[in-house]
Amino acid sequence: MATYAEYCPIAAGAECLADRWTLLILREMMVGAHRFNDIHRGIPRISRTLLSQRLRTLVNRGIVERASMGAHQEYHLTAAGRDLEDVIWGVGNWAVRWAFFDPEEHELDIVWVVWQLHRRVNFDQMPAGRTTVEFRATGARPGRAWLVSDRNAATGCEMDPGYEVDLVVCGDNHALHRWYSGVSPWRREVSDNQISLQGPSRLVRAFPTWFAPNPFAGEITRHQAAQRRA
Amino acid sequence: MATYAEYCPIAAGAECLADRWTLLILREMMVGAHRFNDIHRGIPRISRTLLSQRLRTLVNRGIVERASMGAHQEYHLTAAGRDLEDVIWGVGNWAVRWAFFDPEEHELDIVWVVWQLHRRVNFDQMPAGRTTVEFRATGARPGRAWLVSDRNAATGCEMDPGYEVDLVVCGDNHALHRWYSGVSPWRREVSDNQISLQGPSRLVRAFPTWFAPNPFAGEITRHQAAQRRA
DNA sequence: CAGTATCCTCGAGGATACTG
DNA sequence: CAGTATCCTCGAGGATACTG
């Protein structure tokens, strides 16, 4: 609270926002994570102790509110928190222009990618009933993860959920991250043989329509176009 | 660098910005401080060691550039740094709406206020030649500071510069900070007898025109009007 | 003026085990 | 499921003294 001890709005704002992890916690609520474990899956490298503490601080500052929803707890942005969304998207858009590059090896995490993807499923493009997609990342930090979509609910799994797999997405981990983020379009990675699909051709054709674009895809595309002009 | 290890623009932005003090260092460059000691006077509670280290980090990240200007060094925002200005003003404007209140005792620092004021002098409203204004803060954290304006240059001093004082601004420290920030208008503090001027009536009448408003004064006024409507 | 080198402290936060 | 309690480590950063 008294860290800066300056009577200045920027200092007051930094007091609220410039703690490690805080922007990512707010991001998770902005993209639809409201339960403790869901928020944690979106930020796997924060410890549960620290996440708990940061959430308490955000509640005390009036940016987040905690509420009992029946049996479980939920965290939601308050009006003050929602008023921060533009600033936080602004931080991300700035980074797209100046500090966001091709994925580095330590940033690769296919489980995290699939977890984030599960929030962007276009259910009206999905087959009726359950669809199970297995992602197999090869190359650096290889791994597997599963996306299960059923009617209008989807989830990401780091363990085999045991359902029959309808479609396998297999590819280089860097390429999967480039596609996920919007840094490169699906078609390019497929035609470069970096990513391939295995499954019924009906599903293979439909797959590119199953996910809404990354929230930063528009800014990334604009930035790439500006780069090419320069 | 690898703190978050997430392939996300918000994480990349937080990596650059969410360090303690960093937003305040950028603020100082945004308002016109470019030399090490000037930046430090704007952020007196940071140690010189840490300021030096943060500046180096900002240079490495491409947000600030350091250049020799003749004998001395200067720090300036790069294009990437200038592109951050809207985000940083956004943080301050958000704080005005949700996290900026009347000054607390630990935030009072009349020397810092006068130092910041020296950048906002309207030289065309100032008398020709040198003008020395002494600020005397009474009440909590009392202190004195001097503002010296000469032609088109001004500075703030924490020690008596030894010049004849042309005008004395005397008042409660909280009131001086409210006026400085734009939280309350000059006329209100004067008519409430919280602040008074001592000096030739010509200078007393002119004083309220001598400084450009605080950069957040507009947002503060808008916010106060919205508060009254609610 | 504009820093840097060195030493030392303390508190943020990780690991682990636990709870309603 | 959603955390909390406890213990411990290590590194950020303050204090001090120094330099071109």
Image: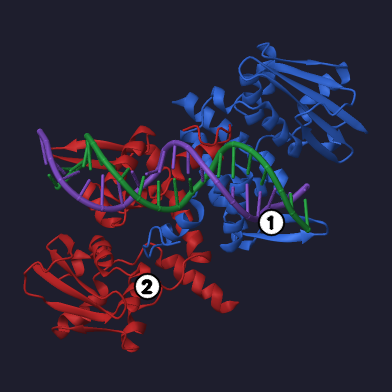
Chain colours: A blue, B red, C green, D purple
Give the residue number, with chain letter if any, for mark 2.
B105
- Residue situated in front as seen by the camera: A60 or D18: D18
- Residue situated in front as seen by the camera: A17 or A95: A17
Q: Position of residue B164 (x, y in %)?
A: 6, 74
Q: Position of residue A180 (x, y in %)?
A: 66, 28
Could you tell me which residue is drawn at 68 percent across and 45 percent down? A39
From this view, report whether residue A74 is shown above or below residue B101: above
Quarter in which the C terminus of chain A is drawn: top left
Mark 2, other Cα within 10 Å: few <14 / some 14–19 / many ≥20: some
Could you tell me which residue is drawn at 75 percent across and 29 percent down? A158
Q: Are marks 2 and 1 on the same chain?
A: no
Asked whether residue A20 is in view, the answer is no
Left/right of residue A119 with respect to residue B131 in the rendered view: right
From this view, report whether residue A155 is shown above or below residue B215: above
Give the residue number, with chain letter if any, for mark 1.
A76
Asked whether residue A134 is in view, the answer is yes
Mark 1, other Cα within 10 Å: few <14 / some 14–19 / many ≥20: many
Label 2 sits on what residue type? Glu
Q: Quadrant of residue A174?
A: top right
Tag 2 secondary structure: helix
Q: Position of residue B151 (x, y in %)?
A: 12, 62
Label 1 sits on what residue type? His
From this view, report whether residue B179 is shown above or below residue A176: below
